[in-house]
């Protein structure tokens, strides 16, 4: 009797793994609820002191208290207080610009926005001014960076010993996102992607929500894009550190920009209707069929986007075609010595001053910001490293520049974002293309707001920096392949 051929074992897609983990997490929540009646994880997150629809007077009171806490803590943390109020004014101007550029100003949730900026501020205080906060963040980031380096092992990554670590981080994303969503009164999908962007890149974080992407509202999709532009991947921190950037500042910028990105996104494109919650099973079931059909195409597109995202880390060319063209144009009208970098420096000089940079260094920091937006953050950090090595910037200007550059918000990333999201779900291409430039602006505003907050709470010159975990992966000594 002829034996039937063995079927080839199929490797599940990322979306299928995530769906299965959601089911396991539901069982975990039920077990906790049985062991401690009334204290399931969902119940705990629901008990956070913020309701879905607080009254108007409560919103105004809460916003006033948050603002007062900001000002009081800044006064306590800084001795040279007059220099601390310049970035506070800059942050207010950035927020005001977001309100003016909003698609529906009347729909902006004051509670969500003020709480998002409050989280950014207190996270900044925790990770930049305390040893415990700085060490904990650097340790978690090191674990995530090490884990991501195993992604190339394919099926061994899914079924091997690292499954427990991946599951642990999935628990952090899900329940951390659920807690953030309840605290900020937003949908769970927005909370999950905001937490995930602290560690993952803009092409990796949306993979966690692939079945839900087709059912997202415009505001929710805008949060997904803004979070990607406002953050960097944990796997790229080593490159920035090799250029001379401070590890503790990069790590704190990653976590501070996450809630700020959500707050900025909710100002520019607020929710106007009844948004679907990411935990709604009906939305997941409606999208699962299409997600399964596109699983193979999704992996191909995501892989191509991730490869496109990998930028050269060597010495970038200074005399590009665009730079030379601008120099020639100014020479034709009789103005010599003008380069594209100098032009960008003058454009972003006011922004650098708003972030608390000394007036004598605003032009230099403005150049770095302009290069980061027009080219990418790799070039910006490379030039920052050269300035640090040559002693061309003060310690304060170095810190502000490090925070301002920490994000994927550059013109080339718009193409990566469109290719990634439309590759996962082709029918949302039009929606992504419509708002991708606005999301790029929102992501950069979030990074600049983080620089403003860091400048306001920055320790005085000569103060000892908080301790942090020494990650071998940040020193090119990572044990992962």
Image (spheres, grey):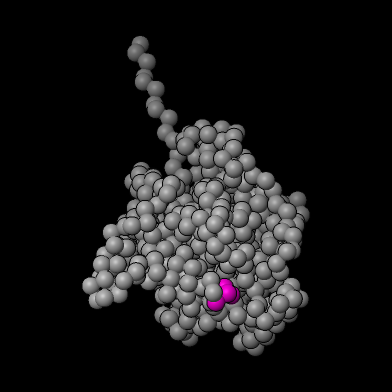
Q: Report x, y in % for residue 166.
A: 58, 43
Q: Residue at x 59, y 45 (%)?
A: 474
Q: Nearer the viewer, residue 147 or 93?
A: 93
> Does residue 461 appear left or right of residue 218 in this picture?
right
Q: Report x, y in % for residue 63.
A: 64, 82
Q: Is 462 inside the magenta-drawn segment?
A: no
Q: Residue at x 52, y 55 (%)?
A: 385
Answer with the quarter of the image where residue 345 lies: bottom left
Number of numbered discs visible in the structure rendering: 0
Q: Report x, y in % for residue 434.
A: 33, 69
Judged by its main secondary structure, the magenta piece is: loop
Q: Is 358 inside the magenta-drawn segment?
A: yes
Q: Locate the N terminus by quadrant.
A: top left
Q: Report x, y in % for residue 94.
A: 51, 78
Q: Nearer the viewer, residue 462 or 108?
A: 462
> Does residue 475 appear left or right of residue 468 in this picture?
left
Write down the region rendered in magenta.
355-359
């Amino acid at each position: 009797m002829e034996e039937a051929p063995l079927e080839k074992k199929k490797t599940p897609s990322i979306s299928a793994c995530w769906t299965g983990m959601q089911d396991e997490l539901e069982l975990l929540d039920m077990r906790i609820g049985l062991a401690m009646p009334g204290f399931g994880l969902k119940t705990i997150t629901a008990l956070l002191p913020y309701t879905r629809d607080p009254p108007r007077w409560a919103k105004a009171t809460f916003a006033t208290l948050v603002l007062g806490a900001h000002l009081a803590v800044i006064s306590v943390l800084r001795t040279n207080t007059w220099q601390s109020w310049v970035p506070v004014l800059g942050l207010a101007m950035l927020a005001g610009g977001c309100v003016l550029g909003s698609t529906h100003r009347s729909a902006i949730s004051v509670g969500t926005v003020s709480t998002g900026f409050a989280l950014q501020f207190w996270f900044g205080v925790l990770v930049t001014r305390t040893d415990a906060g700085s060490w904990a963040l650097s340790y978690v980031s090191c674990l995530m960076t090490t884990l991501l380096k195993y992604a190339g092992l394919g099926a061994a990554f899914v079924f091997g010993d690292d499954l427990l670590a991946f599951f642990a981080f999935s628990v952090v994303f899900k329940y951390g996102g659920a807690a953030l969503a309840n605290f900020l009164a937003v949908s769970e999908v927005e909370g999950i992607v905001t937490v995930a962007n602290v560690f993952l890149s803009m092409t990796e974080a949306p993979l966690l929500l692939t079945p839900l992407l087709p059912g997202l509202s415009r505001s929710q999709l805008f949060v997904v894009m803004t979070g990607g532009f406002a953050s960097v991947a944990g796997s790229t921190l080593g490159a920035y550190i090799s250029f001379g950037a401070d590890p503790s500042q990069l790590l704190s910028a990653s976590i501070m920009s996450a809630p700020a990105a959500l707050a900025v996104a909710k100002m520019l494109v607020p929710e106007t209707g009844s948004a679907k919650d990411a935990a709604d099973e009906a939305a997941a079931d409606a999208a699962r069929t299409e997600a399964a059909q596109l699983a193979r195409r999704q992996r191909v597109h995501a892989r191509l986007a991730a490869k496109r995202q990998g930028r050269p880390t060597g010495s970038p060319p200074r005399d590009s075609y665009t730079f030379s063209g601008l120099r020639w144009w100014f020479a034709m009208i009789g103005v010599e010595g003008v380069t594209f970098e100098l032009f960008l420096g003058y454009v972003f000089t006011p922004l650098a001053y708003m972030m608390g940079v000394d007036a004598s260094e605003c032009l230099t920091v403005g150049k770095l910001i302009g290069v980061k937006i027009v080219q990418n953050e790799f070039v910006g950090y490379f030039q920052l490293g050269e300035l640090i090595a040559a002693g061309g910037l003060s310690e304060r200007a170095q810190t502000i520049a490090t925070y301002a550059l920490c994000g994927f918000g550059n013109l080339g990333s718009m193409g990566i974002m469109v290719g990634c999201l439309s590759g996962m779900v082709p029918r949302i291409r039009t929606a992504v293309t419509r708002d991708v430039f606005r999301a790029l602006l929102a992501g950069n505003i979030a990074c600049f707001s983080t620089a403003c907050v860091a400048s306001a709470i920055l320790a005085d010159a000569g103060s000892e920096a908080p301790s942090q975990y020494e990650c071998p992966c940040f020193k090119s000594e990572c044990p992962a392949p």
